[in-house]
């Protein structure tokens, strides 16, 4: 399996005062529960209702066991546990009082076998050098967007970033203007927007 990589600039600076550059995986969307169920249906014999009940039942067990001090290990996937944050103060009687207790995050440690399987993938070189970003005019942004639509009929914000060699915020600002002007239509849900002709 081949996977796309992109370049990012870290907040940590190098010896020349510039942010360090590193490669990471390209992220296109978040797979939702209905989408995950559809993928399960395509690759197994379970029905949609059964798949949903399994996922919902698993979530309920997480809610029961994790807060009660249990870690949950799923073979081939990994181990889940909770991390708590709180403030502890001494009251007038010298007793410790717990305040602002909250769950900070769900920790996940992947199964070693999963990591080994994922490391069999082939990493493709970055689509573009995002370390050398440039100024993009509104006219250039519109011309590029229309050119990309002519090639595939639609594109995602990451595609625009790579082609224009601009940051996410710059790409979002230009695409938002084009949508407001009626040049583009923004479809899809949160975190997986698709741009196409209106």
Image (spheres, rainbow, N blue to C red):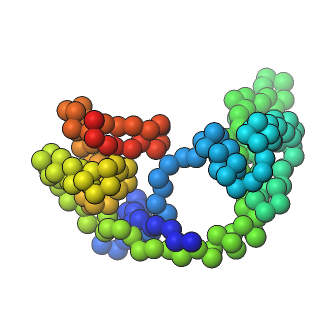
- List x then y, in percent, for residue 151: 28, 57
Residue 125 figure quarter:
bottom left
Q: Is residue 131 left or right of residue 46?
A: left
Give the left or right position of residue 137, taking residue 81 as reference.
left
Q: Quadrant of the C terminus?
A: top left
Q: Residue shown at 34%/43% (left/top)? A: 195
Place of residue 1 in the rendered image (x, y in percent of width and height, measured from the top left): 57, 72
Looking at the image, which is closer to me, 196 or 19? 196
Viewer-nearest residue: 48 or 121 = 48
Which quarter of the picture shows residue 138?
Answer: top left
Q: Quadrant of residue 162?
A: bottom left
Total marks placed: 0
Q: Residue 173: x percent and y percent?
A: 27, 41
Residue lying at the far top in this picture: please name it. 92
Residue displayed at 27% across by 51% down: 149
Residue 16 position in % (x across, y down) = 30, 72
């Amino acid at each position: 399996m081949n996977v796309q990589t992109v370049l990012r600039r870290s907040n940590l600076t190098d010896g020349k005062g510039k942010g360090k550059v590193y490669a990471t995986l390209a992220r296109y969307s978040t797979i939702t529960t209905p989408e995950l169920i559809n993928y399960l249906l395509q690759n197994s014999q379970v029905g949609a209702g059964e798949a949903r009940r399994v996922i919902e039942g698993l979530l309920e067990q997480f809610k029961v066991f994790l807060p009660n001090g249990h870690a949950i290990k799923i073979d081939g996937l990994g181990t889940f546990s909770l991390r708590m944050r709180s403030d502890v103060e001494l009251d007038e009687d010298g007793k410790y009082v717990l305040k602002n207790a909250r769950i900070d995050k769900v920790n996940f440690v992947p199964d070693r076998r999963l990591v080994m399987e994922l490391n069999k993938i082939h990493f493709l070189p970055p689509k573009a050098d995002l370390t050398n970003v440039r100024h993009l005019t509104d006219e250039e942004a519109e011309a590029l967007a229309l050119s990309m639509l002519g090639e595939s009929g639609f594109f995602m914000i990451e595609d625009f970033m790579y082609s224009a060699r601009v940051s996410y915020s710059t790409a979002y600002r230009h695409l938002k203007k084009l949508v407001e002007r009626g040049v583009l239509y923004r479809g899809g849900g949160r975190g997986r927007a698709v741009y196409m002709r209106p």
